[in-house]
Image (spheres, grey):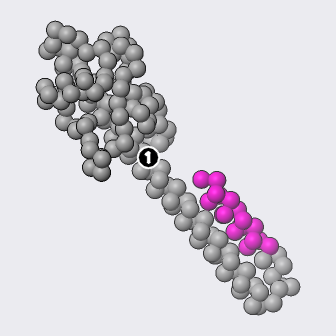
Amino acid sequence: MVVPIAFIVISVLAIIVLMAVGQKISGDLKTVGVVICFIIGGLAIRQLYQGIIQREALYEQHKACRDRIEELNKAIETYNKDSIELMEKLDNKNLKKLSKKKLLKTNFFQDGDKKEFECTYSSKGNLNEGGEIECSVHGTYSNIKLEIIKHDN
């Protein structure tokens, strides 16, 4: 975000300088200066646009990760209601249990090139005593929600 703003500031300053000393500069040199300003301005707009696109992609990743954590929380809650043994942590063994009982819609076991997401999930603390599920990429549910709220505001 800093780079596009710097480009815009430089472009504006260059235009101001060209306008201030415009009478003293020959026509060809003035044209070259204006073209350079437009090129710098175009680059600034391109950088700004790419920054917005990247921010939106990250926002969508956060929302998808939040949804997967919500799915895991609901699956664990359902598992604990229906089972004598309570699930206290999330690991591959327990993910397989949830999957085997058909409590998950998402495939959390992905193969190499077929990966839909880079996230892996585990628990932080005992899930029955205030622990929470954590993503290896985006962090805890509360952190992800904060990032989504920041974007929405």
Residue lying farthest to the bottom in this orientation = 27
Q: Is residue 74 visible?
A: no
User: Who's the residue at 30% across and 14% down the image?
Assistant: 88
Residue drawn where x is 33% and y is 44% of the image: 117
Residue extending farthest to the front is 112
Q: Is residue 5 visible?
A: yes
Start-end of magenta stretch: 1-17
* Figure disc tally: 1
**Residue 8 falls inside the magenta stretch:** yes
Question: 137 and 42: which one is in front?
Answer: 137
Majority secondary structure of magenta residues: helix
Depicted 61 relative to depicted 135: above or below: below
Residue 120: image location, x then y, percent: 35, 34
The quadrant holding residue 17 is: bottom right
Quarter holding residue 81:
top left
Residues 35 and 12: in front is: 35
Residue at 44% from the left image edge and 46% from the top image edge: 58
User: At 73% from the left edge and 80% from the top edge, which residue is drawn?
Assistant: 33
Front residue of 6 and 115? 115
Residue 138 horizontal/vertical position (percent): 43, 36
Callout 1 environment at 10 Å: few (<14), some (14 to 19), or many (20+)? some
Give the amino acid at mark 1: Leu
Say left or right for 59 vs 8.
left
Give left or right: position of 111 versus 56: left
Q: Which residue is mark 1?
A: 58
Is 137 within the magenta? no
Residue 60 place in picture, x, y as percent: 38, 46
* Element type at mark 1: helix
In the displayed structure, 13 sits above or below 97; it is below
Residues 131 and 91: in front is 91
